[in-house]
Image (spheres, rainbow, N blue to C red):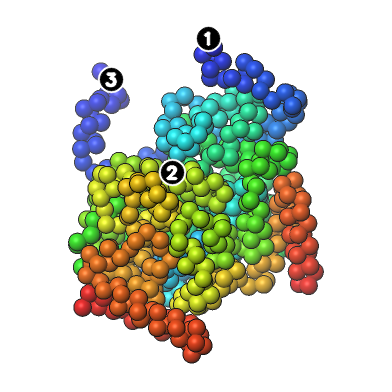
Amino acid sequence: MPTTQENWNPGKAENRHPEATYEEKEKLFLEVKNDVRYSDFLYGCYECGICVSTCPSARFYDFSPRVIAQAMAREDVERIYDIITEDIWNCAQCFSCVRCPRQNNPGGLVTILREVSLKNGLQESKDALQGYSRVIYKVMLKGNQVSPDMLQPDFFPDWGPWVANFSQNMHVWRKAIPMDSIRGLTDVAWRTDRKTLLELYTIWFESGNMDIIKELDESLYDLLVEVMQEELEEG
Amino acid sequence: MPDNLTTVEQILERKSHPVVRDAQVAPTDDMHDRLLELEAKGEIVLQRMKGDTIEFPTKYGRMKKIPIEHTWHHKSCGHCGHIPGYASSILWLHRQFDLDYHDPTDQTSCTGWNYYASAASNAVGQAAVMSRNFAAAYETGYFPLIHCGTSFGHYKEIREQLVHHKELRDEVRRILDKMGKPLVIPEEIVHYSEWVYAMRDRFKERQLVDMSPITATVHPACHYYKIVAEDAIYDPEIYGGQRTAVVTAMLESLGINVADYSTWFDCCGFGFRHVLVQRDFTRSFAVLRKIETMKNEVNPDLTVTHDTGCVTTLDKSQFAAKAHDRKVGIPVLSDAQVAALAMGAHPFRVVQFHWHSTDWRPFLEKLGINWQKYWDEFQADLDAIRAGTKSGITWQDADQPIHLTA
């Protein structure tokens, strides 16, 4: 029979990820801990479980914001590595967990863990974001997260025949919207000035955002850099 | 027993009547004070509202100022991309009262949806995107009104980070310098549903459709009231001050019967990443924890929410559930769309019902609205656009309220 400690923390009972050394795992944890937001997101944990009781992902996955807060508070490097590689992409980022009476923000901790995972090129994160690159391309280049032309029946079969109906009528429906800033547009959500987009590209380069993209998807990185640099050079 | 201990009887007594909170004993710092300090030090430009404002209490009893006009409409990707009747209803409501507003093209997405989905950014990048948008609003003299719940929540959190971390402010300022922009933070971060809440009595005065046959449920949007929870409007008259008042108060002022259901606190299942690339979770959660629960407990005619992702998730998830014989079939609208419809907005030219999947016809029929008549009018518009005799629908076509039930 496993002990309580082993049940709570299977990562300590057994090294579930021998493919990474302890030093590699510790480096990731220290990156998380050194994030400017870390001290705002973690104050300790009462193990009360309020975060779990409100968590949508806990209802559908083997996922627990309480375990995340606990592992971080105990600085349990092995368990944190388990979380980075197995759990973080299940979080719905709704922030229901901030109901925490200790003022923790497990959803915020997940955000930092994800960011560190991407920066370090972890394969599990690349797998979780498969199929997502086109969205990153859209938001970084066009300044909109989604656009009407993304609503294609192949991508949204579970949304029913409405998607095909929309797709066939997209161009005329888009012209039948009274707002000047969005009327007629299909490849972006709203009309954005060129100057505004150049400023956005400047932010991506200056904030270190592009380094993250390079680790995540090198071809996407090359494509984005080529387009954005050309635009910035034109001015 | 010592005087400073609270008894169970005292707790029950307190919960038996509306909660009126005292801002003097709020458990958090007042963000307004911190912003004024930073302004005094010359670290930020604090943008102030112009013209009429109204104040309402937030969760801990502090007052929040809401601008009535001169607003810079920070649009939402999901509204403009996939639910355009949401955005056009917000602007249509402004136009009905001749309120001055600006619909900018110098605005980018907050990029928060992407960040919560992929984390393919960082704190500096996200703060710089927000600050660039706020600086763009400041340059026009109009005050930001945030359409998206996620942008609203994300910006509130970034504001906290900027206030608490000088190194973040310095880094963002370095990037903004390259664009010749100052670091601007508005005196309040305001969500459009707070403006809708502030305007609810004026909507009622101009109401043309009797909404009393309708029973609706409300899904409060997580990123509106869970992120930086203290900065959401609460009203002792609504849910005894125990839940946010926006959406519900407006529906009640229009005469809609708002029915409660047990999973009101649950999220919609959007999940940011999930809705785009792992929708099994999204569909299951939206149907099993929200739609089916509403259906079983109160069988509403409509469910109403105030955020992009919630409308999309709750609406679009219902189709696949029908194949599994789940109890679904509740149309989903935003509060702005409901208000516009009640005031006589055209169901298709303004509210744009045709972008919604779950069958909305029974809802309109229950209101006595002959939707077919308006759909035929709209089809004539589309035919004219296809024929090239009309370039598109404009405000000139859409502004005039209609006696929809006449």
Disc 1 is placed on an element classified as loop
**Sequence-first disc among 2 and 3:** 3
The 10 Å Cα crowd at callout 3, few under 14, some 14 to 19, many 20 or more, is few
Q: Is residue B196 visible?
A: no
Examine the rendered structure and indicate whether residue B60 appears above or below residue A6: below
Q: Residue at x 52, y 56 (%)?
A: A156
Same chain for the residues at labels 3 and 1, yes or no? no
> Which residue is label 2 attached to?
B284
Q: What amino acid type should be assigned to the residue bearing mark 2?
A: Ser
**Which chain contains the residue that carries disc 2?**
B
Q: Position of residue B58 (x, y in %)?
A: 37, 50
Of tags 3 and 1, which is closer to the observer? 1
Instruction: Establish if A158 lies above or below B211.
Output: above
Residue B207 horizontal side relative to residue A43, left or right = left
Which residue occupies the extreme bottom position in the image? B389
The residue where tag 3 is placed is B2
What is the spatial separation of the Cα atoms under label 2 and label 1, in whole angstroms?
34 Å
